[in-house]
Image (cartoon, grey):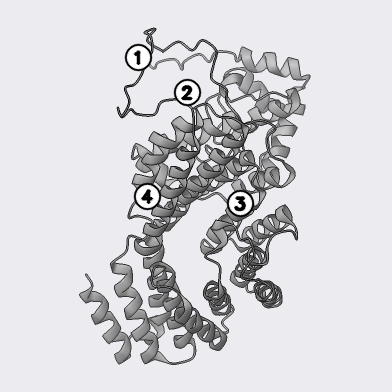
């Protein structure tokens, strides 16, 4: 005897909100489809679909989040899928939301930190979603800094257990908890931690200390964001949190956790808006553009680079302008758009030429110098198969680049090896490639390994040549 299927429960929450919003079933379906198009999704819901939802059927994938956003826009208050009696959105969408308020931004990003800190392997397997770039970048571009980010201490605060607060003795260490006052020293500590992890990332790869960074965000940064602080301190706190969150995304990107990295970047973008730091938001968008280039999404990369430019206008210092144009050039290069790429490279070069020693440059742009610009030129010319120019610029970058930027030097060495190969200089290409492979073996960077693998794919037509056999013997010795 077969069991009868479970009876669905009518969704009264959704029905009530449809009535409040004044939607017809067809009207709701149409708005969900339109919002889906904003995310690059081809959804074809109709009034019958809405009828099924009202009868208790759960829409799949990202649709619950889209339905919630439709009602949020209509009713002017933030609603979640659960508020509509629907299941939470699928992981493919979670974390890509551009929060409506600073409080919601803290909830979203801290949820990411906690899941990542808990070694959720599935989180690191989430796919990169090109369509998920559209809404956050648009909302950042048209948005403005939040009116208020400060958090006052609640009046007559009672401890959760109902026990009186025991004053801490002088010199006694204590863990930070939510509600504690945030000081300038706390924010300086966040900045120092960021510099430490940046140095480790540059030298040893994103996998070296990524997990420690995420745990720091969970155990130190989240309690600060849920602490008490005034407006000025709050802006500085959100700025520091944005920087560390972008770095968590950058290190995730370096270990090929691309979907997770994308989510960190989106949340860093939102935190930068709360900080009122428009320029840093543009830097996050440039980072997102770089990831899109690496993954071969050139069109999205161009769009992100241009949104970053529009967001800061012409007021940015020359170094930042040069960085903005070089990022756009890389995006055009991966698309094979010679004219647009060359034009952007020229703008980048001219902007850097106007930079002066006394210019006020944001800390996050100080890495961008002649060595980095030459690196960008080398990559772009390689992508355009202009190998002589690629070799010239890659060599210049290696001459100028400081040893501390070990991973960047490795990337540039592979670009030079590929350029030498393109020029028919097989022996020199294999020598350079073997040097890079040896360096990659010492790092915890999937990107470094992928650069070497890309070079090896280019070697395939010459696999029986003596230099290539020698290269393989050397690489095999690295284990």
* Residue at the spot of label 2: 179
Height in image: 311 above or below 58?
below
Nearer the N terminus, badge 3 or badge 4? 4
Is residue 11 visible in this depiction of the protein? yes
Few, some or many residues within 10 Å of mark 3 (<14, 14–19, 20+): many
Find residue 144 and report its horizontal and vertical position in percent: 72, 41
Height in image: 60 above or below 475?
above
Cβ atoms at labels 2 and 1 below 8 Å apart: no
The residue lying at 27 percent from left, 86 percent from top is 470
Nearer the N terminus, badge 1 or badge 4? 1
Q: In the image shown, does 147 or 267 lie closer to the viewer?
A: 147
Nearer the N terminus, badge 3 or badge 2? 2
Left or right: 452 as drawn, with respect to 51: left
Cβ atoms at labels 3 and 2 below 8 Å apart: no
Nearer the N terminus, badge 2 or badge 1? 1
* Residue at the spot of label 3: 280
Count of numbered labels shown in the rendering: 4
Few, some or many residues within 10 Å of mark 2 (<14, 14–19, 20+): some
Find residue 141 and report its horizontal and vertical position in percent: 71, 47
Cβ atoms at labels 3 and 4 below 8 Å apart: no
Q: CA distance from mark 4 to mark 2?
A: 27 Å
* Residue at the spot of label 4: 210
Find residue 13 and report its horizontal and vertical position in percent: 62, 14
Q: CA distance from mark 3 to mark 4?
A: 21 Å
Cβ atoms at labels 3 and 1 below 8 Å apart: no
The residue lying at 71 percent from left, 52 percent from top is 311
Q: Nearer the viewer, mark 3 or mark 4?
A: 3
The residue lying at 65 percent from left, 73 percent from top is 352
């Amino acid at each position: 005897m077969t069991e009868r299927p479970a009876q669905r429960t009518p969704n009264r929450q959704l029905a009530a909100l449809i009535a409040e919003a004044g939607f017809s079933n067809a009207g709701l379906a149409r708005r969900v489809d339109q919002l889906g198009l904003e995310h690059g999704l081809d959804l074809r819901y109709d009034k019958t679909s809405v009828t099924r939802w009202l009868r208790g059927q759960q829409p799949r994938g990202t649709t619950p989040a889209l339905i919630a956003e439709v009602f949020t826009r209509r009713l002017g208050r933030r609603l979640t899928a659960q508020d509509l009696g629907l299941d939470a959105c699928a992981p493919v969408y979670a974390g890509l939301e551009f929060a409506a308020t600073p409080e919601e931004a803290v909830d979203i990003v801290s949820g990411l930190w906690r899941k990542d800190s808990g070694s959720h392997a599935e989180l690191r397997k989430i796919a990169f979603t090109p369509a998920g770039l559209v809404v956050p970048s648009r909302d950042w571009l048209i948005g403005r800094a939040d009116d208020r980010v400060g958090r006052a201490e609640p009046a007559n605060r009672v401890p959760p257990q109902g026990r009186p607060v025991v004053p801490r003795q002088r010199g006694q260490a204590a863990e930070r908890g939510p509600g504690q006052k945030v000081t300038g020293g706390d924010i300086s500590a966040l900045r120092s931690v960021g510099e430490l992890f940046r140095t480790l990332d540059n030298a040893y790869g994103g996998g070296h200390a990524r997990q420690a960074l995420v745990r720091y965000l969970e155990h130190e940064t989240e309690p600060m964001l849920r602490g008490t602080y005034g407006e000025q301190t709050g802006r500085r706190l959100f700025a520091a949190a944005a920087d560390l969150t972008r770095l968590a995304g950058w290190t995730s990107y370096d270990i090929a956790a691309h979907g997770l990295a994308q989510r960190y970047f989106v949340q860093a973008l939102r935190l930068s808006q709360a900080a009122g730091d428009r320029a840093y938001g543009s830097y996050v968008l440039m980072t997102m553009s770089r990831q899109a280039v690496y993954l071969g999404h050139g069109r999205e990369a161009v769009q992100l680079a241009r949104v970053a430019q529009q967001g800061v206008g012409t007021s940015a210092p020359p170094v930042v302008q040069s960085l903005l144009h070089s990022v756009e050039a890389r995006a055009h290069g991966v698309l094979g758009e010679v004219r647009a790429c060359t034009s952007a490279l020229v703008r980048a070069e001219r902007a850097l030429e106007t930079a002066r020693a006394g210019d006020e440059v944001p800390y996050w742009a100080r890495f961008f110098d002649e060595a980095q610009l030459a690196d960008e030129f080398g990559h772009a010319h390689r992508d355009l198969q202009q190998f002589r120019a690629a070799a010239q610029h890659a060599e210049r970058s290696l001459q100028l680049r400081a040893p501390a930027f070990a991973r960047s030097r490795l990337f540039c060495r592979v670009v030079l090896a590929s350029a030498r190969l393109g020029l028919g200089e097989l022996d020199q290409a294999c020598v350079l490639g073997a040097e890079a492979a040896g360096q990659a073996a010492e790092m915890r960077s999937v990107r470094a390994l992928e650069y070497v693998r890309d070079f090896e794919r280019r070697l395939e037509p010459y696999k029986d040549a003596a230099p290539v056999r020698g290269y393989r013997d050397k690489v095999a010795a690295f284990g």
